[in-house]
Image (cartoon, grey):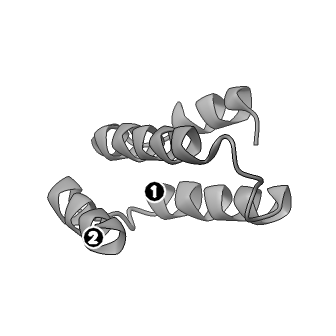
């Protein structure tokens, strides 16, 4: 999914979700910086499907409070 596509989709999200989406994109950039020298683990199709699901979840209001999201990330990657 291109940067432009992501930005166009982010512009359509409800205002209350923008901080959470911003933090999630920061997390994805962090993951990318760690793995940029490694080959991709998943195909572009799988990545695009995951990004689409995240977008749809945000549009439907299926998002966690920011504190809970970071706690989940810490548990998963700590």
Q: Residue under label 2, please give it.
A: 72
In the picture, measured across the screen, residue 69 lies left or right of residue 22, that is left
Q: Whole-percent x and y of residue 48?
A: 74, 56
Mark 1: secondary structure? helix
Q: Nearer the viewer, mark 2 or mark 1?
A: 2
Circle 2 residues within 10 Å: few <14, some 14–19, many ≥20: few
Q: Residue sitting at 53 percent across and 36 percent down?
A: 10
* Above or below, comparing residue 53 to residue 35 in the picture: below
Q: Nearer the viewer, residue 63 or 28?
A: 28
Residue that numbered label 1 is attached to: 58
In the image shown, does 9 or 34 lie closer to the viewer?
34
Q: Quadrant of residue 37?
A: top right
User: Callout 1: 10 Å neighbours few (<14), some, many (20+)?
Assistant: many
Q: Earlier in the sequence, mark 2 or mark 1?
A: 1
Q: Quadrant of the image for the N terminus?
A: top right
Taking the view exactly as shown, the residue that stands out farthest to the front is 37
Image point 65% across, 41% down: which residue? 36
At 35% from the left edge and 63% from the top edge, which residue is drawn?
63
Disc 2 to disc 1: CB gap under 8 Å: no
Q: How many marks?
A: 2
Secondary structure of the residue carrying tag 2 is helix
Q: Indicate left or right for 48 with 59 as reference.
A: right
Residue in view at x 73 percent, y 64 percent: 41
Q: Position of residue 72 (x, y in %)?
A: 27, 70
């Amino acid at each position: 999914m291109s940067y432009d596509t992501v930005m166009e989709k982010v512009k359509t999200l409800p205002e209350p979700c923008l901080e959470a989406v911003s933090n999630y994109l920061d997390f994805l950039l962090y993951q990318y910086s760690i793995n940029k020298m490694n080959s991709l683990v998943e195909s572009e199709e799988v990545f695009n499907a995951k990004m689409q699901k995240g977008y749809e979840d945000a549009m439907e209001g299926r998002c966690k409070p920011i504190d809970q999201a970071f706690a989940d990330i810490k548990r998963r990657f700590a």
